[in-house]
Amino acid sequence: MAQTFITLVYDMLLFGFWFWYWDNVLSMNRGVGNGWFFFLSPSFWCPKSKGAKGTREKYDLDSIQMVKSVSLNTAIQEKKNVI
């Protein structure tokens, strides 16, 4: 029973690493994937921060202009009227 549990944990760690690695290497419609050696680069272990932490601006909902939503049927009817 203990060996089964150890094998289960081992498989979870192995497949977890495998999926994490390929998720970073393959692009899959998300831009450019990393190289196969991405975990060996210093930028992976010590990333440069893009900005100071805690400086995120808070948005004022009153200042945001809301856009009128248009359904697809309305858009098609307006397109037919123009033609």
Image (tube, rainbow, N blue to C red):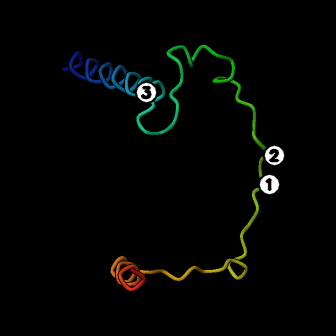
Give me the residue at 80% from left, 54% from top: 55
Give me the residue at 43% from left, 30% from top: 23
Q: How many labels does the image show?
A: 3
Which sits in the foreground, 5 or 68?
68
Q: Which mark lies nearer to you, 3 or 1? A: 3
Q: Which mark lies nearer to you, 3 or 2? A: 3
**Which element is circle 1 on?**
loop
Which sits in the foreground, 18 or 10?
18
Q: In which quarter of the image is residue 61?
A: bottom right
Please say if 38 is above or below 56. Answer: above
Give me the residue at 68% from left, 23% from top: 43
Task: State the residue position of label 1.
Answer: 55
Give me the residue at 53% from left, 24% from top: 34
Categorize mark 2 by other alpha carbons within 10 Å: few (<14), some (14-19), many (20+).
Answer: few
Q: Which mark is residue 52?
A: 2
Whether the residues at callouts 1 and 2 have beta carbons within 8 Å, the answer is: yes
Q: Quadrant of residue 44?
A: top right
Whole-percent x and y of residue 67?
Answer: 57, 79
Q: Which mark is residue 26?
A: 3
Distance between mark 3 and mark 1 Cα atoms? 32 Å
Categorize mark 3 by other alpha carbons within 10 Å: few (<14), some (14-19), many (20+).
Answer: some
Whether the residues at callouts 3 and 1 have beta carbons within 8 Å, the answer is: no
Distance between mark 1 and mark 2 Cα atoms? 6 Å
Categorize mark 1 by other alpha carbons within 10 Å: few (<14), some (14-19), many (20+).
Answer: few
Q: What residue type is labelled 2?
A: Ala
Q: Which mark is residue 2?
A: none
Q: Is 34 displayed left or right of 15 in the figure? A: right
**Which element is circle 2 on?**
loop
